[in-house]
Structures are given as structure tokens and as C-alpha cells.
């Protein structure tokens, strides 16, 4: 995986390709260069700065334009975002002047911004519910449900994750340092459930026991690991925001400690099972 800062310059023949550069190390932002008429879509509140010729419009839903022109199509797009814990609205930035114009977006937490071209992954990426930062207009933000009930209950990410679809660039935010692993068919990787940042749909996601009873109770790693089985790609983050927030919360002297299974539907029982209390 290339090292930061990443940058990309347009390939001739790809009409929807955008130029961008990711700047910074631990506190990154992505700077997107637009030609006249080109647009980028981002989460509300993610913008750092923009050129004056870039017009900003708040839209209902994910701004992809892929749900049809009617009200019900827009309502469906907004509903998907609401289910994944995002705002009902996104912001579309369109260059309406001449020449080149730029707009920049930043991640809300320390970590890395990862640029991914969806058509190189077969057109889809599954990631954490709050991972999406920005994209070339046309990328759809949908829902991915865990296929196994136990994975949804104990997998840390819950039943619902984000599914990004399209053929353009997307920019996803991940905590700490990001590692990309390519899994061969049948190859397995065991990961802390909170450290799974993203994966391709071809990767099988299941849970396995973390070890014996002693390890489960006293090991501090919870009862389950995520078992990821190839083929496909997996992105692992070294510092999930929930882990960072838990450390800060514990250091403040407040009760509660960490919550490493931020998406668990079990509440306090999930904290106990997950090794958080």
C-alpha cells in the first residue's frame, strides 16, 4: 500500500476521474481538484475550505443521483443513511467556474484517509458505519447486513455496516495506522472486531472463540475474534475511535471505561462479554 501522502492525477479516457492529494500524517485532509462541471459529495461538516467557484448544495440522501428522480427515491437514499447512523443530508460541491478549482475535506478523528477506486474492487466496498468521508459524485452509500446472527450480535460492528457502490473514487476515514491485507482463497486472518475498517464483499466474515475460558475472562480481548477468510482485501485500523474514546473516558475519572464493540446490540451485556468491564 502506498505511503502517505497519497495523490492521484487524472487518466485520460476516464471522464469521471478526479484529481486529489491527501496531505498530513496523523491528522489528514484530502484536497480534491475539480474541472468545470465536476462534483464531489461529502459528509455534512467535513469541508475545510473551497475555492469561490465551487458551489455548495445540501441534498437529501447520499447525493449519488442513483435512486431515481422522484421523492420516494430520495427518501430511500436518506433512509439508508439514517439506518447506518449518518445524517439525512450530504453536501455536493460543484465547480461552476472555469479552469481548475479545489475543495478540501478532513477526517474528524486522528487516523488516515484512504483513497479507494471502487471499480478496481469490483464496484463495492463494505466498511464501518461512520467511515465514509467524501467521494466523486455518483457513488452510492447503502447498507450491508451481517449474514450471520451471531456475527451481528457479537461482532462489534453490529448488524449494519456501510456499502459503498460505484466506479469512482471514495475516501474513507480510519483510525490510527491502516494496514491492507490481500487474502488468498481460503486464507484466514483473525482480527479484533473493532479493528476491522473495511473489506471487499468476497471476504467471508465470521466469529471464532478467542481462546479458553481463562483467556476470555482475563485476556482483555473479549470472547470473540473476527475470522476473515479470503479471497479478497481487508483494511485493518490500529486505533478504532471507540478504543481511543474509551481510554479518554477512563482517564477522565468517569465510570464506564472503554467500549470496543461500538456497534453491539447487547448494551451492557455486550460490554461484559466483549471484555470492556
Image: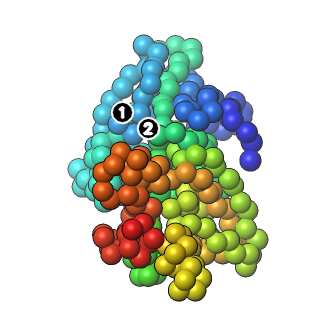
Q: Residue at x 55, y 73 (%)?
A: 219
Is label 1 in contact with label 2 (beta carbons under 8 Å)?
Answer: yes
Name the secondary structure under disc 2.
loop
Badge 2 local density, few (<14 within 10 Å), some, or many (20+)?
A: few
Question: How is colour applied across the structure in the image?
Answer: rainbow
**Image spot of residue 256 (x, y percent):** 32, 59
Q: Residue furthest left?
A: 71
Q: Residue at x 68, y 66 (%)?
A: 232
Taking the image as shown, residue 249 lies to the left or right of residue 10, namely: left
Q: Nearer the viewer, residue 184 or 167?
A: 184
Check disc 1 and report its element: helix, strand or loop: loop
Q: Is residue 89 visible?
A: yes
215 vs 140, left or right, is right
> Dot 1: few (<14), some (14–19), or many (≥20) neighbours within 10 Å?
few
Q: Earlier along the polypeptide chain: callout 1 or callout 2?
A: 1
Disc on res. 108: 2
Q: From mark 1 to mark 2, how far is it between C-alphas?
A: 9 Å
Label at residue 248? none
Q: Quadrant of residue 22?
A: top right
What is the x, y in percent for residue 245?
Answer: 41, 49
Q: Nearer the viewer, residue 56 or 3?
A: 3
Residue 73 occupies quadrant? bottom left
Q: Is residue 238 above or below residue 276?
A: above
Identify which residue is drawn at 23% across, 50% down.
71
Name the mark nearer the viewer: 1 or 2. Answer: 2
Q: Report the quarter where the C terminus lies.
A: bottom left
Seen from this angle, which residue lies furthest bottom? Answer: 213
Please, is residue 21 above or below residue 209 in the view?
above
Foreground residue among 125 and 192: 192
Q: Which mark is residue 45?
A: 1
Q: Residue 54 in the image: x percent, y percent?
A: 43, 20
Amino acid at each position: 500500500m502506498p505511503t502517505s501522502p497519497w495523490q492521484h492525477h487524472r487518466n485520460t479516457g476516464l471522464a469521471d476521474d478526479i484529481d486529489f492529494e491527501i496531505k498530513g500524517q496523523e491528522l489528514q485532509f484530502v484536497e480534491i481538484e475539480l474541472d468545470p462541471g465536476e462534483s464531489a459529495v461529502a459528509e455534512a461538516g467535513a469541508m475545510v475550505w473551497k475555492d469561490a467557484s465551487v458551489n455548495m448544495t445540501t441534498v437529501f440522501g447520499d447525493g449519488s443521483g442513483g435512486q431515481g428522480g422522484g421523492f420516494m427515491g430520495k427518501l430511500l437514499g436518506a433512509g439508508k443513511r439514517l439506518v447506518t447512523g449518518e445524517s439525512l443530508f450530504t453536501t455536493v460541491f460543484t465547480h461552476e467556474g472555469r479552469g481548475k478549482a479545489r475543495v478540501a475535506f478532513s477526517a474528524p478523528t486522528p487516523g488516515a484517509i484512504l483513497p479507494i477506486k471502487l471499480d478496481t474492487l469490483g464496484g463495492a466496498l463494505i466498511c464501518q458505519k461512520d467511515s465514509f468521508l467524501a467521494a466523486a459524485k455518483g457513488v452510492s452509500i447503502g447498507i450491508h447486513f451481517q449474514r450471520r446472527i451471531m456475527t451481528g450480535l457479537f461482532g462489534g460492528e453490529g448488524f449494519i455496516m456501510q456499502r459503498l457502490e460505484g466506479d469512482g473514487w471514495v475516501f474513507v476515514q480510519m483510525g490510527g495506522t491502516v494496514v491492507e491485507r490481500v487474502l488468498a482463497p481460503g486464507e484466514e486472518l483473525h482480527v479484533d472486531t473493532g479493528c476491522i475498517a473495511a473489506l471487499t464483499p468476497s471476504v467471508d466474515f465470521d466469529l471464532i472463540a478467542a481462546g479458553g475460558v481463562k483467556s476470555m475472562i482475563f485476556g482483555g480481548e473479549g470472547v470473540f475474534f473476527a475470522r476473515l477468510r479470503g479471497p479478497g482485501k481487508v483494511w485493518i485500523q490500529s486505533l478504532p475511535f471507540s478504543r481511543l474514546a474509551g481510554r479518554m473516558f477512563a482517564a477522565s475519572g468517569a465510570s464506564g471505561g472503554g467500549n470496543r464493540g461500538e456497534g453491539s446490540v447487547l448494551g451492557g451485556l455486550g460490554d461484559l462479554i466483549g471484555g470492556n468491564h
